[in-house]
Image: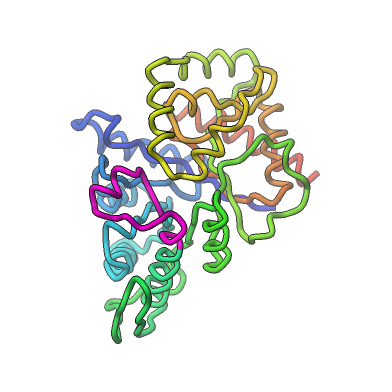
């Protein structure tokens, strides 16, 4: 049984400008040290360029793969393919692409992108197809609904072993259909693990986005969790406002889930207080490992973690994953 773990890069809008590059480099090194395959790099209107941040990551690690968020509204598919090929040419490093169909609604409107939710996934299929064909070394001619190209070819090309992995958010039916059509890893914001049966997801490769706070004991983990993510009335109001202005299916799905008790490791307080955008698993190594093992048994083999606050957090998380794999394989 093999799994792939990705951490997440700090966001530029929540980090001091003068120390940001050093912080990114440090988080990347921690992630590589504790067996992460790669690291997610966000993109939206409020953040600096994800590709330039990815260059910092590559220059400060030996094998860690940036998982670059790609928004069609920001660049032509040829430009994405050119960036991937350039990283391959300069560094011999494989990238992963997190194909983003949406984003914050106001960001899209500011770019005059009024494409309806499900149609954005149709566009994403065309977009990703062109990128893949170019990276495979083929000449691309296509007259589609969203993109038209004529005998387009990528030079220099990309070595086949550096072909990027592709992730797609699959919280909506349109997202699931797109992941299936592309053969991409379908990324979910998971429900509590007890809601999953033991059957593998029918949509093929699948992963989840989840934060983890774990320690040797339950009490220690919960003390750290509540200290790091205290309930915040201002954050709750911001979360409610975001709900009103978002057409994100995963955002609504998480918001509709009931808050779990402290005895349950599945924890939504950080999300409900607008501190992060994924559920958390909190508890001792044994308890969190049991939850992770349930997700793995259900067929999820990719895990995208939240931004690590320090190297120690990744060390503890690594212990829980090691125990989870022991449970699954024993």
Q: Residue at x 42, y 53 (%)?
A: 65
Task: Tell me: residue 77, above or below residue 143.
Answer: above
Region rendered in magenta: 101-121
Total marks in image: 0
Q: Nearer the viewer, residue 224 or 177?
A: 177
Q: Residue at x 57, y 45 (%)?
A: 208
Residue 99, by quadrant, is bottom left
What colouring does the structure picture have? rainbow
User: Is residue 25 shown in magenta?
Assistant: no
Q: Position of residue 176 (x, y in %)?
A: 57, 58
**Is residue 291 left or right of 171 when viewed as pictured?**
right
Q: Position of residue 74 (x, y in %)?
A: 27, 57
Q: Nearer the viewer, residue 208 or 248?
A: 248
Location of the C terminus by quadrant is top right
Q: Position of residue 6 (x, y in %)?
A: 49, 45
**Is residue 206 left or right of 109 when viewed as pictured?**
right
């Amino acid at each position: 049984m093999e799994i792939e773990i990705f951490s997440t890069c700090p966001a530029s809008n929540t980090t001091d400008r003068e120390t940001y590059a050093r912080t990114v480099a440090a988080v990347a090194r921690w992630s590589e040290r504790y067996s992460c395959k790669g690291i997610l790099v966000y993109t939206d209107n409020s953040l600096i360029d994800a590709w330039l941040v990815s260059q910092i990551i590559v220059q400060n690690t030996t094998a860690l793969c940036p998982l670059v968020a790609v928004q069609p509204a920001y660049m032509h598919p040829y430009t994405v393919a050119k960036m991937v090929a350039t990283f391959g040419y300069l560094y011999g490093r494989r990238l992963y692409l997190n194909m983003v169909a949406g984003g914050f609604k106001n960001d899209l409107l500011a770019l005059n992108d009024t494409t309806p939710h499900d149609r954005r996934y149709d566009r994403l299929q065309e977009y990703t197809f062109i990128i893949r064909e170019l990276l495979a070394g083929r000449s691309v001619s296509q007259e589609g609904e969203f993109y038209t190209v004529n005998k387009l070819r990528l030079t220099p090309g990309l070595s086949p072993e550096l072909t990027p992995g592709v992730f797609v958010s699959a919280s909506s039916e349109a997202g699931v259909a797109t992941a299936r059509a592309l053969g991409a890893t379908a990324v979910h914001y998971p429900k509590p693990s007890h809601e999953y049966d033991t059957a593998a997801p029918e949509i093929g490769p699948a992963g989840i986005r989840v934060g983890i706070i774990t320690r040797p004991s339950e009490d220690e983990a919960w003390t750290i969790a509540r200290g790091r993510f205290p309930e915040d009335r201002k954050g709750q109001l911001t979360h409610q406002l975001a709900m009103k202005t978002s057409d994100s299916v995963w955002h609504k799905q998480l918001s509709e889930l009931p808050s779990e008790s402290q005895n349950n490791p599945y924890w939504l307080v950080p999300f409900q207080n607008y501190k992060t955008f994924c559920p958390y698993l909190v508890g001792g190594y044994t308890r969190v490992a049991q939850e992770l093992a349930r997700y793995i048994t259900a067929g999820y083999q990719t895990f995208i973690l939240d931004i690590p606050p320090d190297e120690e957090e990744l060390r503890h998380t690594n212990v829980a994953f090691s125990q989870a794999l022991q449970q699954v394989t024993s």
